[in-house]
Amino acid sequence: MDLDFYGSCGNLSCDKGEGNNCFKNLHKEYKFYLSFENANCRDYITEKFFLNALRHDFVPVVMGAHPDDYRRVAPPGSFIHVEDFPHA
């Protein structure tokens, strides 16, 4: 699967000065946002989920907190959790 990486750790970036328009421009091409947290801990859900993904109408694919933690704070059907699928 091909993935595009934006930001300081990726090979792609938004034009300087775009600010939040960067997400609006990305939304023209992308529907999903990988919202992988730095740690897999109970109740650990950060701006990657709320601000970067949901606020900009992306479907977040999440890893971090337990699936029940996301279900408790997110609208039904608004995310895809990696633990909902079998691991290879």
Image (cartoon, helix red, strand yellow):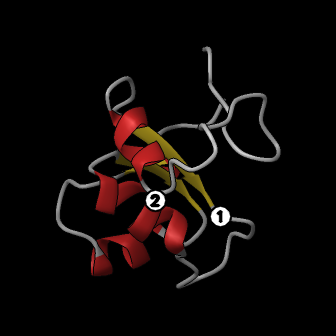
Amino acid, disc 2:
Asn
Most extreme residue toward the front is 17
Image location (x, y in percent) of residue 23: 42, 46
Quadrant in which residue 39 is drawn = bottom right
11 is higher (above) or lower (below) than 63: above
Viewer-side residue, 72 vs 57: 57
Q: Is residue 30 visible?
A: yes
> Tag 1's secondary structure?
loop
Viewer-side residue, 85 vs 60: 60
- Could you tell me which residue is drawn at 41 percent across and 48 percent down? 21
Which residue does the numbered mark 1 point to in the structure image?
Answer: 37
Lateral position of residue 35 relative to residue 4, left or right: left
Quadrant in which residue 26 is drawn = top left
Q: Earlier in the sequence, mark 2 or mark 1?
A: 1
Lateral position of residue 45 relative to residue 8, left or right: left
Most extreme residue toward the top is 1
Lateral position of residue 5 relative to residue 84, left or right: right
- Could you tell me which residue is drawn at 61 percent across and 65 percent down? 64
Image location (x, y in percent) of residue 6: 66, 38
- Could you tell me which residue is drawn at 24 percent across and 55 percent down? 78
> Tag 2's secondary structure?
helix
35 is higher (above) or lower (below) than 68: above
- Could you tell me which residue is drawn at 30 percent across and 80 percent down? 73
Which residue does the numbered mark 2 point to in the structure image?
Answer: 52
What is the spatial separation of the Cα atoms under label 2 and label 1, in whole angstroms?
12 Å
54 is higher (above) or lower (below) than 4: below
